[in-house]
Image (cartoon, grey):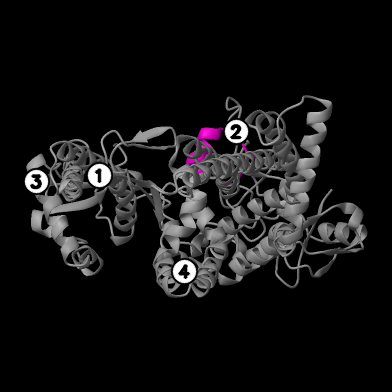
Amino acid sequence: MPIKVQCTECQTNLSVSDQAAGKAVKCRQCGARVKVPGAAAAASAAGSVPAKRRAPGKAQDPDDLFGDINLNQLEDTKKKVCPGCANPVKDEDIECPKCGVNIGTGVLSDRQRIKRERKGPPPEEFYRDVWSNAWKFFKKHWTYAVRTALIWSMCVSMALTCAYALNFYVTKRRASLEEMVQKERANITIIGDRLFIKVPEGKGNKVEFDGKFYQQDASIWAPHVQPWTEPPSMFWIFMTGAFSLGFGGWFWTMATTITNTTMAGEKRVKRFNFDFFANLTLGIRFFAWPTVLMLPFLLVAGGVAALNPLVGGILAAVFMIFPVLVLPAAVVHMAQKFSYRAWLLFWMTRDFGRSIGASLYVFMMMLFLVLLIPGGVAGAAAATSGRLVPWLQSQELAATDWLSANVMALEAGGNMRFLMFQMPLVFSSSFAFFCVLFGLISCQVVFMMRVIGLYGLYFRADLSIVNEFPDFERATFGPRYLAFLVDLIIMALLTGVGMFIGQMFGFLFSMYGWSFAAQGALIAGGVASLILWGMYFTLGESGSARATLGKWSIGIVVMQDDGLPIPMPMSRDLALKRAASAFLSVLTLFIGFLSCVWREDRKAMHDAMTKTKVVWQPETT
């Protein structure tokens, strides 16, 4: 039968086995030694209490079967219940697993009180529990380390192979173009990045270059630029970027999934499959997030690089240390419904300052557990690149020569030899190398992702996490700034379409022999771009759409400021006026946009001019 004792240090009630009678046990709450009375002493203490004399009962009704039972004193002595929530508890429980109330005292302990106030465990326990908890998690999910090593090795090996193919095509194509230039040296001049073809005067004269006959003077890209603008190069650039995004996408997929699981209190990660195309979209975040976060400082570094490239590069590298420091807080934000604060320097600086000790602790763990090995390998490769690259090239040449001599005879430097021997050789050797490299760190990567999830769990109250907004609450400057950056990308694409339209007009102007064809093409392209921008904002923000692609990606919409509980969408006329007003805000050097920072109604200049507002879209949308 269990023996009840009380700790003299923290007043915690303990329930120990009768086998500990006469011994000392350690308090589970504070760690102090607690003496357990012997079996005889416990029995004598129980027997020393005099039995209460039963009060004479009332006369029983012979027809009442339950007349001698006092319903007010009914109690199941075989079961123990919590004094706080009345849920059944075990004899060895000190605190109720349901409500956290101390079973002996009937009140919340300090730990449970802090846990309820912060909606998570006390932060000081993070440093004690992080290693053991993350290790237990890794032992249950070690297969994710294997998947991570294989996926990363595949993505990086494919990216390097595609980059190798790109270099092969550009090098061979450039040599071919330069050979053509030497043949027509008298009629061809290269100035900077342009190649100028001068056709000799006389009827029927022409100049042949790259399989094309020129009967009029022309200007095209120089041989060192031309290969990069051709479809094969575009294809290999796209494939290199796609596989690079797959590497970063798997990182964010794993990080946000494990963080969500940890912060939800679940013990195991729900099974999910590798979706390459979904990882491509998340891979954009891998490269875009640090760039957007540090964009103001990177612009400063770019200005310095224009004067001194070395100093500008060093400055940019120093600035990019900060995203690594705030990575734990950013991953926690990315795992929430509203993740926009992870992209804003103000909120990340605030979160880092409020949890600076834990952030630096996680950074040091990440540095020594994950970054040390690949950093050392990269440093060694950079230090020995002068000898390493020629050695690799000689090994590749020797291997391809052996294959050509023993497997299939193919011409050296030919396309078939490259496709049949060189590309498979580069991929297989790269895959083997990166399997070893990522195999050495993949276990630590999964371990650190659990650490980041625990960081979010223990420091939830210190992070500016947002999971909901009231319907139609006005959006502040931060989300509008991010939406504007996305719209800038769309506007850049529309500018390309506009300039293409301008080139078509320039072609028509040149057919009529107009001397200002080039200037006319530029003007027509600019006008077409402005029209496309206006259509994008007008059609996007009016009617049921209510927002551009940038605003939809953040979750904000544009509505009329009509004072109604549910504001009305804008008409196309009003949306066109708002787009024109936004253009006027640009003319104020963006000061009109910044007015939403200090105005109480969070309106920019073009919002106030058109009586509109930018709000968070409701949940039912």
Is residue 477 a member of the stretch shown in magenta? no
The residue pinned by badge 4 equals 349
Label 2 to label 4, Cα distance in Å? Answer: 33 Å
Mark 1 highlights which residue? 499
The residues tagged by marks 3 and 2 sit, at their Cα atoms, a distance apart of: 46 Å
Residue at which label 2 appears: 272
Compared with 463, 504 (above or below) is: above
Element on which disc 4 rests: helix
Q: Is residue 121 above or below residue 171?
A: below
Q: Determine which of the numbered discs, if any, sits on residue 574 in the image.
A: 3
- Residue at 59%, 66% in the rendered image: 359
Query: Callout 3: few (<14), some (14-19), or many (20+) C-alpha neighbours within 10 Å?
Result: some
| Pointer 2 local density, CA inside 10 Å: few below 14, some 14–19, many at least 20 | few
Secondary structure of residue under mark 3 = helix
* N-terminal label among 4 and 3: 4
Q: Residue visible at 61% across and 35% down?
A: 270
* Residue sitting nearer the eye, 384 or 448: 384
Q: Identity of the amino acid at label 1?
A: Met
Image quadrant of residue 269? top right
- Label 4 crowd (10 A; few <14 / some 14-19 / many >=20): some
Q: Nearer the viewer, mark 4 or mark 1?
A: 1
**SS of the residue at dot 2?**
loop
Left/right placement of residue 323 relative to residue 268 reads left
Question: Which amino acid, by three-letter code, is at mark 3?
Answer: Leu
